[in-house]
Amino acid sequence: MALQIQKTQTALSEINVTPLVDVMLVLLIVFMISAPLMQQGIQVDLPKANAQTLSEVPDQVLLVVKKNHQLLLNGNPIQTDNLRNLLLRYSKAKPDVQVFIQADESLPYGMIASIMAEVKQAQVSHVGLVTEPPTSDTHGY
């Protein structure tokens, strides 16, 4: 008598994730392309008004001192007497405004020190001096 062995087949229960990954990558690309398009605003017709534009106070102010002792504040010539008042307006509008002084190297040290004192008296706490990196033939002084 021969023994008969019965094999029962079990179902293969593995999930193929390749199509799932393909679909997810396609959705990722679609969202990456469409997200910047959704950032645009809605078109609105604004009312007309006869008013001046609001002046934006910059975070950084460049104060240039030329060889002939002329002062330029952000490219606009100013008088030395008006420097403190103008910088005081900047510091009141933005308390963390930075003033960078770009002065000619032939100017006396005392003049630059007095300009820096004017900037400090205008309640500006961040003051810097603009310099150029030394060339290879100089020693940096």
Image (spheres, rainbow, N blue to C red):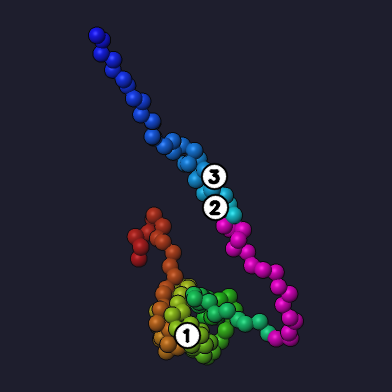
Q: Amino acid at mark 3?
A: Val
Q: Which secondary structure class fits the magenta region best?
A: loop
**Quarter-wise, where is residue 39 in the image?**
bottom right
Q: Amino acid at mark 2?
A: Met
Classify 27 as above or below 45: above
Magenta segment includes 11: no
Task: Choose the circle earlier in sequence order: 3 or 2.
Answer: 3
**Quarter-wise, where is residue 72 in the image?**
bottom right
Residue 60: image x %, image y %? 49, 75
Query: Start and end of the magenta stretch?
Result: 35-51
> Which secondary structure, mark 3?
helix
Residue located 54% across and 80% down the image = 57
Q: CA distance from mark 1 to mark 2?
A: 41 Å
Q: Amino acid at mark 1?
A: Ser
> Which secondary structure, mark 2?
helix
**Residue at the spot of label 1:** 91
**Residue at the spot of label 2:** 32
> Which secondary structure, mark 1?
helix
